[in-house]
Amino acid sequence: MKKKLIINAITVNEGIQSKNDILVEGDKIIQIKPNIEPEIDVEVIDAKGFYILPGLIDDQVHFREPGLTHKGSIQSESKAAVAGGITSYIEMPNTIPQTTTKVELDKKFQIASNTSAANFSFLFGGTNENIDEILKLDKKQVAGIKLFLGSSTGNMLVDDPEVLRKIFSSTDLLIAVHCEDEKTIKKNLDKFIKKYGVDIPISKHPLIRSNKACYISSSKAISLAKETGARLHVFHLSTAEETRLFDNKKELKDKKITSEVCIHHLWFTDADYDKKGTLIKWNPSIKSKSDQNELWKALNDDKIDIIASDHAPHTKIEKDNTYLQAPSGGPLVQHSLLALLTFVKRGKISLEKLVQKACHNPAILFQISKRGYLREGYYADFVLVNLNAKTKVTRDSLLYKCGWSPFEGVIFDAKIEKTFVNGIKVYDDGMIIKTNAGKQLTFNR
């Protein structure tokens, strides 16, 4: 592979913006400094006017393969991811079959190694019955364990207290949890079914999957983690109350209990249900503006450690349904960085903080080897972005297999110019260049 020299860019890395050139050989960055003299037979890419960020690491995506490939596949959704500046992802276990055995985990690794445009790993699903499979896991191979403490797509609810305690006590792998209290949700749902029958308005979703349901479940998980010493990561915070369960008194590498927020909870509020309907039905639900404001505060104060997408595509036909029938989730990876860059332009978050939360911190949290930073000797995963251009989301521009986006019609205040994965240019000015550049993530454990 010919060496590549990216010149005249502003790098954003480890809290610093600076003018640098980046020299890439093979799959690694071999030099970062100003004014690198180009060698003979080096491909020179002039990035004047652009920022270079480390490739984003999205620790929560649902790419739907195997078994649900009418919604998306590892190939289709990883192409959308690199178009969105995401160079590594960790995919969830609620596929068909579910990723709850070593055999199914290995099948996913094989699919991704053949078809993924971005780097990949997977969370292993915990159930009420598979503790023996969990204990067999190689912690250098698997990203962590995923537990659904509230039912969501795939019906992988873990609701046996003794099983939970056993899992929390028996592994030093990171345990990532979806927290919603099932009893509270059922009680709320029954109340609205009695009132509306099958015609429950979508606007009632945050009253059914309520703040209370989230807080009860998150606080229980945190209490169990503190009692057992487990390494706990709480996915997709959506409420003001939950942010108060976390602290910013330690550096991330020293925290045993961490949290994340997702793009849709930062962008949409319950005021958007009237216009967007079931297209913005997620679990946990989109909640109030005051909840969103507290999420932003906790993110910038470092009580929330990670920004992710929870990309979870369904077909438009599936989503265009009644409240009870429409599945929760939506496609996001192609536009999550664009949304974040728009927030930068609006003063909601700094570019340096964005890189910390979406690039550096996932690498620290999961102990990912040689990714998440612009460093010599690290893999050449990075994205060139233009903050002086705009991107309009149109149906024709979408790479999601499901063919729709909750952001259709939105004009973002930035443009993703080019994405590199392992030194390979995989995306350039609207075009996918390479479809299988991804490698399996490795972990320093």
Image: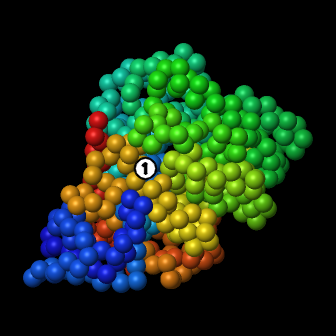
User: Is residue 192 left or right of 317 when viewed as pictured?
Assistant: right
Instruction: For residue 150, say whether it is visible.
Output: no
Q: Residue furthest right?
A: 195
Q: How many marks?
A: 1
What x and y, as percent, mark residue 212? 74, 36
Q: For numbered disc 1, what is the local secondary structure? A: helix
Closer-to-camera residue (367/11) = 11
Residue closest to the eye, 413 or 80: 413
Q: Amino acid at mark 1?
A: Asn
Residue 385, image quadrant: bottom left
Q: Residue at x 53, y 20 (%)?
A: 227
How packed is label 1: few (under 14 Cα within 10 Å), some, or many (20 or more)?
A: many
In the displayed structure, 292 sits above or below 135; it is: below
Residue 436 percent across, percent down from the top left: 29, 61
* Quadrant for the C terminus in the image: top left
The residue wearing badge 1 is 361
Who's the residue at 80% across and 36% down the image? 188
Q: Position of residue 78 (x, y in %)?
A: 40, 59
421 lies left or right of 308: left
Q: Is 3 situated left or right of 413 in this image? A: left
